[in-house]
Image (spheres, grey):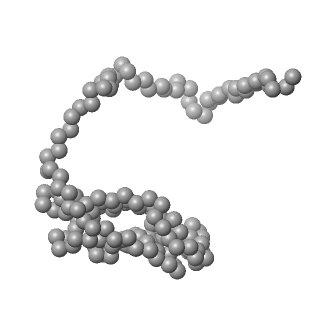
Amino acid sequence: MIKNIISVIFNLFNFDRPRFAQLRYTDVVINNKAYFLVSWKIEGGYKFKIKSLNYRSYKSSGSAYIAIPDDINAIELVISNLWKSDTKKIALLRQSISSQLDFFPVKQFKELTTRSIYMPQLSVPINNLQIPVFAIHTKNLTKP
């Protein structure tokens, strides 16, 4: 509750133009259905909106996986704060992905066995556990 109040007060006095600190997106077609995957991080703003898909988020960072209708060929991303906004237009490429993906095992790593995994366990209850403090003293070699 207090965090939300502080956030509102901070946004009232933020007159900078919002900008994307990080924006990653792709549009794919899987089984003849189009999807838009987006990940964002906003600086100077608190609202992220995708106009043509009726999606909005009030988080400064996040990600979304959204179905795209067939008639949409471009998407407009809008970020804003209380005073200013910024837009970015994206043309959709509609990259097709096979419905059956083949995953090949990585051969350069050794397979894990139960003998290669070590799980330490404490035999002493945690409330009785005492850990000695170590101090390292080094000699100052820069003095003559």
* Residue 59 vertical position relative to residue 143 in the rendered view, above or below: below
Q: Decide which of 58, 80 is in the foreground and name it.
A: 80
User: In the rendered picture of this protein, how many numbered marks are placed on residues?
Assistant: 0
Q: Residue furthest right?
A: 144
Q: Is residue 62 visible?
A: no
* Residue 92 vertical position relative to residue 85 in the rendered view, above or below: above
Q: Decide which of 17, 37 is in the foreground and name it.
A: 17
- Residue 17 horizontal side relative to residue 144, left or right: left
On the rendered image, what quadrant is the N terminus found in? bottom right
Image x and y of residue 18, in percent: 50, 71
Image x and y of residue 43, in percent: 51, 65
Q: Decide which of 118, 138 is in the foreground and name it.
A: 138
Q: Is residue 48 visible?
A: yes
* Residue 30 vertical position relative to residue 87 in the rendered view, above or below: above
Image x and y of residue 66, in percent: 27, 65
- Residue 62 horizontal side relative to residue 73, left or right: right
On the rendered image, what quadrant is the C terminus found in? top right
- Residue 18 horizontal side relative to residue 143, left or right: left
The residue shown at (40%, 73%) is 87
Image x and y of residue 95, in percent: 20, 57
The residue shown at (36%, 19%) is 115
The residue shown at (32%, 23%) is 110
The residue shown at (41%, 70%) is 48
